[in-house]
Amino acid sequence: RGSVLTTELTSDFLQALDVVVDSKILKDSTDGAWHCTDCAYSSQYRTNTRGHVETHHVASQGFNCPICSKFCVSKNALRIHRKRYNHN
C-alpha cells in the first residue's frame, strides 16, 4: 500500500505526511495536470491529486475529530467533516 506513517497526530506527523504525499505527485509542464507517480491518476487540481495519494498510496493511522472523535481515513476527510459539522 505504499509508505507507512505511524506517528501520533502532531504537527511533526502532519509535516511528514505532507512531505510523503508531495513526493508522490508531479505537475506535467505540457498539460498542466498533476500526476500521481504511483499510478495513472491525474487531475488538473493539486488538491485532488494530493487527496488521491493520501487515500490510496500512503498508509496512516487516520485521524480522529478532536470534537466528536469521529474517525476519518484522511486529512481531507477530517477537514470536510469539521467543516460540515462546524467543528472548528
Image (cartoon, rainbow, N blue to C red):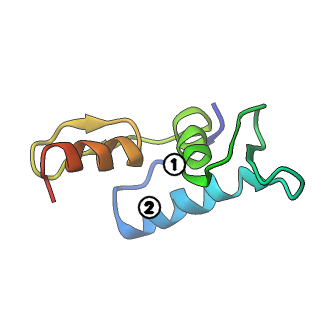
Q: Are marks 1 and 2 in contact (CB under 8 Å)?
A: yes
Q: Quadrant of the N terminus?
A: top right
Is 46 rendered above or below residue 38? Answer: below
Is 88 rendered above or below residue 42? Answer: below
Query: Residue at 40% of width from left, 46% of height from top?
Result: 76
Q: Quadrant of residue 14?
A: bottom left
Q: Quadrant of the C terminus?
A: bottom left
**Residue placed furthest toward the front:** 31
Left or right: 85 in relation to 60: left
Query: Residue at 34% of width from left, 57% of height from top?
Result: 9
Q: Which mark is residue 75?
A: none
Residue under pointer 1: 5
Left or right: 50 in relation to 85: right
Q: Kindly report the distance in space between the C-alpha atoms of the residues bearing marks 1 and 2.
A: 8 Å
Residue under pointer 2: 13
The foreground one among 70 and 42 is: 42
Closer to the N terminus: mark 1 or mark 2? 1
Query: Residue at 13% of width from left, 44% of height from top?
Result: 85
Label 1 element class: loop
Query: Residue at 71% of width from left, 33% of height from top?
Result: 41
The foreground one among 35 and 3 is: 35
| Residue 48 horizontal/vertical position (percent) | 56, 44
Q: Residues within 10 Å of mark 2 (few under 14, many from 20)?
A: some
Is 86 rendered above or below residue 36? Answer: below
| Residue 20 horizontal/vertical position (percent) | 62, 55
The foreground one among 67 and 45 is: 45
Label 2 element class: helix
| Residue 74 horizontal/vertical position (percent) | 41, 42
